[in-house]
Image (tube, rainbow, N blue to C red):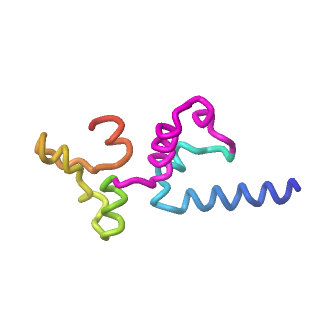
Amino acid sequence: KQWYQRRVRAIWKSSITSSPKLHLYSTLKTHFTKEHYLDLIKIYKDRANLTRIRISAHRLEIEAGRHRNIPRHERACAWCDLVFDKKEVEDELHLLNFC
């Protein structure tokens, strides 16, 4: 049983560190355990939205541009471009810290 658990954890760690899509997730998630926020955030929609941000399952330009083969540095936030005339990459950290 312990061998199996170690193997699953090793595969998980390898998968998240080798995927550019999971860059934020691999930065935030360092241990193969249940996250405390899942119990702390009582409203399902809030918990689901935070989880989507953590695993890059959203419509931010960082993901949408990846599907359209747009270089990472060109995946600009339309809001910041329109309002502030700034070309900022629209990723998860940008959304949470600037927009």
Q: Residue at x 74, y 59 (%)?
A: 8
Q: Is residue 37 magenta?
A: yes
Return the x and y of residue 72 as percentages of the image width and height: 31, 60
Counting labels gives 0
Return the x and y of residue 47 as percentages of the image width and height: 52, 39
- Establish if 71 lies above or below 59: below
**Between residues 39 and 34, which one lies in front from this camera angle?**
39
Q: Quadrant of the C terminus?
A: top left
Most distant residue in the front direction: 44
Q: Quadrant of the N terminus?
A: bottom right
Return the x and y of residue 24 as percentages of the image width and height: 47, 48
Most distant residue in the bottom direction: 69
Which quadrant of the structure image shows residue 59?
Answer: bottom left
Q: Which residues are magenta?
A: 33-59
User: Is 3 placed left or right of 51 in the picture?
Assistant: right
Q: Is residue 1 magenta?
A: no
**Between residues 67 and 42, which one lies in front from this camera angle?**
42
Most distant residue in the right direction: 1
Q: Residue at x 18, y 49 (%)?
A: 87
Return the x and y of residue 29 as percentages of the image width and height: 58, 44
Which quadrant of the structure image shows residue 94?
Answer: top left
Q: Residue at x 62, y 38 (%)?
A: 35
User: Is 48 placed left or right of 74 in the picture?
Assistant: right
**Between residues 27 and 59, which one lies in front from this camera angle?**
59
Q: Residue at x 36, y 37 (%)?
A: 96
